[in-house]
Amino acid sequence: MIKGFLFDLDGVIVDTAVFHYAAWRKMANELGFEISHEFNETLKGISRMDSIARILEHGGVSLSEEKTLELATKKNEWYVEMVDQMTEEHILPGIKELIAQIKASGLKMALGSASKNAPRILDRIGLAADFDAIVDGNSVKKSKPDPEVFLKGAEALGLKNEECLVVEDAFAGIEAAHAAGMKAIGIGDEENLSNADLILASFENTKLDELLAKF
């Protein structure tokens, strides 16, 4: 029986992918190469440092650990500048309504995101107080598809793994959910989320009881 939800952030509650892409692309350009939108899709759900490692490999660039950390800081500063302009209007369709239904039902709810800026984003869009727990890049060491973020989310909610339903938009995130022994809803399309237990284009007009009946 499902007793709680574990939400990813980017691409599920808000779409910050465009901000990440702009910042990663700026970083790559400064290093003398380009990254495509398609390549950026492969960075979904993984940590900042793992993303930088992939980008540097993609560009054939080798840097010292010190320079890599410097770039990570710079990229985050660019990203945060954009995030700080976010408002409630950036919440994706159906999310506010679903969260209201979850709260009214008495089910628990946590955020499980690789983003270190998750609390900042939730605060900007006015949803920070709605979550019973937040597990983000500041409290986990391993990136998805490692299940650490969702295992900690279940623990923070005081629930068994199998009592949690994960909401993700990335293949690696779905893998992480399954590795934790949890079912997962994929937000997006079947081409990118073929491993999800249920795929939805969005949560627009979603009824919580009908959703839970599928699990």
Image (tube, helix red, strand yellow):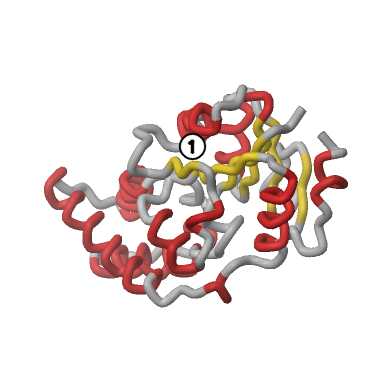
Which quarter shows the C terminus? top right
In the drawing, does residue 3 fall left or right of residue 50?
Answer: right
Q: Please state the horizontal and vertical placement of residue 93, each as a whole percent of the image.
A: 69, 67
**Residue in front for this viewpoint, 65 or 130:** 130
Circle count: 1
Q: Residues within 10 Å of mark 1 (few under 14, many from 20)?
A: many
In the drawing, does residue 207 fall left or right of residue 41?
Answer: right
Which quarter shows the N terminus? top right
At x 66%, y 55%, the residue is: 99
At x 26%, y 65%, the residue is: 77
In the drawing, does residue 164 fall left or right of residue 210?
Answer: left
Q: Secondary structure at mark 1?
A: loop
Q: Please state the horizontal and vertical placement of residue 74, each as a whole percent of the image.
A: 22, 63
**Residue in front for this viewpoint, 171 or 163:** 163
> Where on the picture, by quarter, is residue 167?
top right
Badge 1 is on which residue? 144
Q: Is residue 189 visible?
A: yes
Q: Please state the horizontal and vertical placement of residue 37, each as a whole percent of the image.
A: 51, 64
**Residue in front for this viewpoint, 119 or 166:** 119
In the drawing, does residue 85 fall left or right of residue 186?
Answer: left
> Where on the picture, by quarter, is residue 26?
bottom left
Q: Please state the horizontal and vertical placement of residue 9, each as a whole percent of the image.
A: 53, 53
Give above or below for 198 relative to 91. Answer: above
At x 43%, y 63%, the residue is: 123
Give above or below for 205 relative to 139. Answer: below
- Indicate the amino acid at tag 1: Lys
Q: Is residue 191 visible?
A: no
Give above or below for 175 relative to 109. Answer: above
